[in-house]
Image: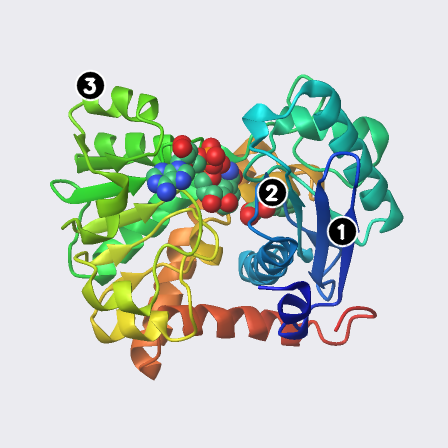
């Protein structure tokens, strides 16, 4: 995709795009909506095939953040930043990484608080500490630096609540005894796997990094090849790696009954959610299921919540999803449609506010 195509199909408020010739990095900050408050969403740093792909990823992810904040009842809008790296993060030396973060901090400062960032794929709390030394508008610093620390725990708890609610909706009842396939055993997925195991699930795992599967295998998990995830029979699929796993074609054949995971923008193509709904597969929309991280960051840093309040609000994700499922069933629409409509209602209810579109 080229930059023209990525931007002309997008209805967000603004996009800042910058290229650094010295490092070869591309910087994109997409502000989708500030209707409910300043836009917020993490900084994703990875290699993209083209600058257009980086812009497309940032804009899509920013839109999902708007819906996430709205459904979670948080007073923030939706945005995301993407840093298109010249090489995989692990191959970038400290001096280059420092320059990249410095330029990103400059970009953040130029938006004067229209957009607040946080960690995402390819960045962590320590990077947020570095950014915050250069600019405000940064959530998710480490506990040592006075921040709330990683959001992975809250995200995983929310995903697990989503999984349980979706299993009931699919007529599976409890997670105990069910085959739960977790794709991606990173910060969130490893925790989701533990929660599933503790609930008595029969765990299946897949990760491109085999070392990450070892601990789960030692606890009895069955290893699934990464290219067989969408062809492996299970009751519950929990995608916790990257987005875009399921397109219409895969949706027609995927052998599971529930999809509930952490990955943002899990579905590809406008009709994919409908295909899942037609097949009776219960999909927990990602921007509802993975809101625990946003609840943690915004709750702690904007709303002054205690960890217990964050936990209580994260546990409500199950109830929100039950309402989404009810609504989808009654209207005969996909769960994705019902969740997006819920977000749009929240956004419409705030249409009297001063700024944003
Ligand atoms: P992470 O980088 O810690 O973990 C991702 C894991 O997925 C890694 O172990 C990686 O090896 C694995 N992986 C990558 N590609 C894979 C593939 N094709 N097949 C199998 N495994 C693969 O990331 P995370 O913080 O655990 O987040 C996971 C997902 O959840 C991301 O998409 C992120 O955007 C989303 N998310 C995270 C949070 C949060 O609080 N961390 C909040 C909301 C959404
Ligand atoms: C996400 O939930 O996808 C994020 O990007 C995390 C986040 C949430 C709120 C502010 C900054 C980062």
Residue at the far left: name it.
177
| Quadrant including the C terminus | bottom right
Dot 3 and dot 1 residues touching (CB under 8 Å): no
- Residue at 39 percent across and 45 percent down: it is 159
Residue 57 percent location from the top left of the image:
58, 56
Q: Does label 1 or label 2 sit earlier along the sequence?
A: 2
Disc 2 residue: CB within 8 Å of ligand 1: yes
- Residue at 24 percent across and 30 percent down: it is 198
Q: Which is more foreground, mark 3 or mark 2?
A: 2
Q: Which mark is residue 44?
A: 2
Task: Determine the secondary structure under disc 3.
Answer: helix
- Residue at 32 percent across and 69 percent down: it is 248
Q: Quadrant of residue 15?
A: bottom right
Residue at the far bottom: name it.
331
Residue 153 in view (yes/no): no
Vertical placement of 77 versus 147: above or below? below
Residue 76 in view (yes/no): yes
Quadrant containing ligand 2 reads top right
Q: How many marks?
A: 3
Residue 244 percent location from the top left of the image:
42, 56
Vertical placement of 26 versus 37: above or below? above
Side of 80 relative to 229 (left or right): right
């Amino acid at each position: 995709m080229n930059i023209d195509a990525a931007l002309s199909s997008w209805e967000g408020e603004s996009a800042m795009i910058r290229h650094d010739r010295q490092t070869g990095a591309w910087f994109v900050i997409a502000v989708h909506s500030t209707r409910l408050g300043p836009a917020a969403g993490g900084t994703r740093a990875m290699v993209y095939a083209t600058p257009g792909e980086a812009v497309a990823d940032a804009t899509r992810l920013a839109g999902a953040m708007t819906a996430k904040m709205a459904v979670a009842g948080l007073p923030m809008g939706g945005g995301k930043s993407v840093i298109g790296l010249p090489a995989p993060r692990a191959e970038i030396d400290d001096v280059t990484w420092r320059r990249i973060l410095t330029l990103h901090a400059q970009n953040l400062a130029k938006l004067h608080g229209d957009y607040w960032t946080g960690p995402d794929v390819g960045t962590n709390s320590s990077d947020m500490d570095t950014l915050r030394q250069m600019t405000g508008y940064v959530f998710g610093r480490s506990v040592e630096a006075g921040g709330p620390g990683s959001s992975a725990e809250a995200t995983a708890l929310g995903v697990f609540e989503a999984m349980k609610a979706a299993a009931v909706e699919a007529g599976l009842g409890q997670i105990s005894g069910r085959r739960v396939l977790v794709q991606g055993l990173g910060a969130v997925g490893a925790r989701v796997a533990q929660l599933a195991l503790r609930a008595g699930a029969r765990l299946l795992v897949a990760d491109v990094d085999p070392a990450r599967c070892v601990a789960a295998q030692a606890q009895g998990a069955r290893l699934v090849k990464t290219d067989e995830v969408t062809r492996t029979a299970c009751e519950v699929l929990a995608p916790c790696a990257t987005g875009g796993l399921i397109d219409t074609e895969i949706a027609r054949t995927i052998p599971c009954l529930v999809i509930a995971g952490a990955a943002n923008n899990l579905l590809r193509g406008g009709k994919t959610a409908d295909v899942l709904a037609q097949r009776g597969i219960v999909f927990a929309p990602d921007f509802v299921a993975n809101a625990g991280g946003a609840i943690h960051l915004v709750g702690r840093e904007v709303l002054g919540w205690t960890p217990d309040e964050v936990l209580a609000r994260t546990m409500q994700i199950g109830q929100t999803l039950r309402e989404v499922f009810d609504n989808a069933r009654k209207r005969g629409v996909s769960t994705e449609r019902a969740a997006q409509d819920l977000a749009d209602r929240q956004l419409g209810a705030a249409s009297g506010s001063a700024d944003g579109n």
